[in-house]
Image (cartoon, helix red, strand yellow):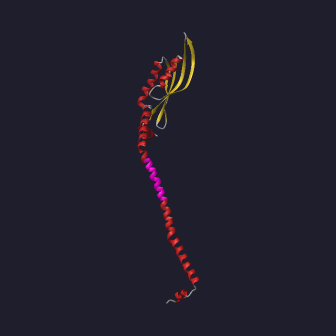
Amino acid sequence: MDPQIEKLLKLPNRQKMALFIAILAFEGIALYWGLFLPKQKELADLQGRLEGLRSEVQDKTRIANNLPKLKREYQQLQKDLESALTELPNQKEIPSLLTAITDAGKNSGLDFLLFRPKPEVPKEFYAEVPVDISISGSFYSVANFFNDVGALPRIVNIANVSFADIKSTGGRTTVRVNCLATTFRFIDKKETSDDKKKK
């Protein structure tokens, strides 16, 4: 027999027990550091990924459950956009819109002293079309005109309203009103690309 093993066998029981416990402790520590700890770290990583995947599945499930609602909202937004674009005439419709404004004034019993379109002011996807207007008539006619312009199917803003030459003739009070009527027109993609080419 090996002399080293014989030496160990001859040791007192306490030393044998201590040696046995030391060997077990060393193996336990080696197993803990060599196998258990890496597996524990791998398990924590996998649990983190699993939680991330669960969260992603919940988000996608929520989106999938809301898909019909989101489609309806998208379709409604499309309709709203189409409706809004009808309120922004294109270049061809501007003369007819300006004619509608003058017709509204004449139908209200007003006299046009000035109707001068100013240069357009281009914005991102639309352009402002300002018109200097000077009209003469009764307060009631002016109020009707503003009301009729507000009822037009296109957007027309009236600003910078000033009253002048208030006169009373034969029991009828007339007033001259100066204002700025601004309408808007849609700039189509072709126009924007043409403008970029010019620049």
Magenta stretch: give its range.
48-63
Q: Could you tell me which residue is drawn at 41 percent across and 30 percent down?
A: 92
How many numbered circles does the render carry?
A: 0
Kindly give the residue lying farthest to the top in the view shown.
Answer: 170
**In the rendering, at what x and y percent does residue 174 appear?**
54, 15
Q: Is residue 69 above or below residue 173?
A: below
**In the rendering, at what x and y percent does residue 82 appear?**
42, 35
Q: Is residue 131 or residue 138 the one in the foreground? A: 138
Q: Is residue 108 above or below residue 195?
A: above
**In the rendering, at what x and y percent does residue 118 appear?**
50, 28
Q: Is residue 63 or residue 96 the one in the foreground? A: 63
Q: Could you tell me which residue is drawn at 43 percent across and 42 percent down?
A: 69
Q: Is residue 191 or residue 87 the one in the foreground? A: 87
29 left or right of 57 in image: right
Q: Could you tell me which residue is drawn at 49 percent across and 23 percent down?
A: 147
Whether residue 52 is in magenta: the answer is yes
**In the rendering, at what x and y percent does residue 155 appear?**
47, 29
Q: In this view, does 45 lie above or below 97?
A: below
Kindly give the residue lying farthest to the front in the view shown.
Answer: 13
